[in-house]
Image (cartoon, helix red, strand yellow):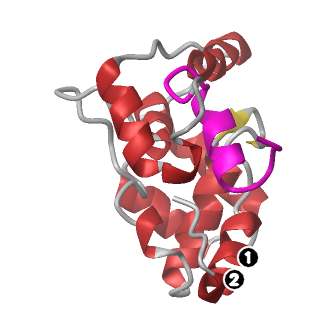
Amino acid sequence: MNPSSGDDSAKNGLIQCLRSPRERLGHYVILPRLIDKVRLRASGLLPPEYHANLLRLPDPSSSFFPLDGRFLEFTGLDPGALEQAILEAHDDQTVLQWVASHGRPHSSEEIRAWERSFESLPPDDRRTAHRKKTYPELAHRPDIGTLPPFDLIDLDEGRHGS
């Protein structure tokens, strides 16, 4: 998803401004990145390739589970309500407070188990094919089908060496 042509340097800079999905707000991974994407889209700066999965709930009939959707599913939050809360909040802590008061409560242990689930998604042929199509610059990697999703995104967005 990381554009590579020289005329996309501004877009590349915006992508690198997105926080890693492994960064936390409170105890939640994904939330800081989700906040970044919602705010960038509202300002018209989110690259188009990020729009399709923004605040998208998982589709149980497929093996693809967008990270935003996994966060929404875990917390029980409505995508539109969360988006509105993000846009109305002046800072990340206000969003976290909103999530805490509107989301499904979880113990620290449940949150840690949920976070670990991102590291143990079993690879399959459909996921591997999807990743090769979605991340063409990483498609050559023999581990493309087994990389944890946070690592895949960080590699794609230039946060890790390949």
- On screen, residue 147 versus residue 13, left or right, reads left
Q: Badges 1 and 2: C-beta atoms under 8 Å apart? A: yes
| Furthest residue toward left | 61
Q: Pointer 1: what residue?
A: 13
For image coordinates 49% across by 24% down, the residue present is 145
Estimate the x, y position of residue 140 in percent, counting from the top left. 55, 38
Estimate the x, y position of residue 111 in percent, counting from the top left. 65, 21
For image coordinates 32% across by 20% down, the residue present is 125
Residue 108 drawn in magenta:
no
Which residue is more in the foreground, 23 or 77? Answer: 23
- For label 2, the crowd category at 10 Å Cα-Cα, with few meaning under 14, some 14 to 19 and many 20 or more, is few
Q: Can residue 129 be seen in this view?
A: yes
Bounds of the magenta span?
Answer: 144-162
- On screen, residue 129 versus residue 115, left or right, reads left
Q: Is residue 77 visible?
A: no
Q: Nearer the viewer, mark 1 or mark 2?
A: 2
* Quadrant in the picture for the C terminus: top right
For image coordinates 58% across by 33% down, the residue present is 149
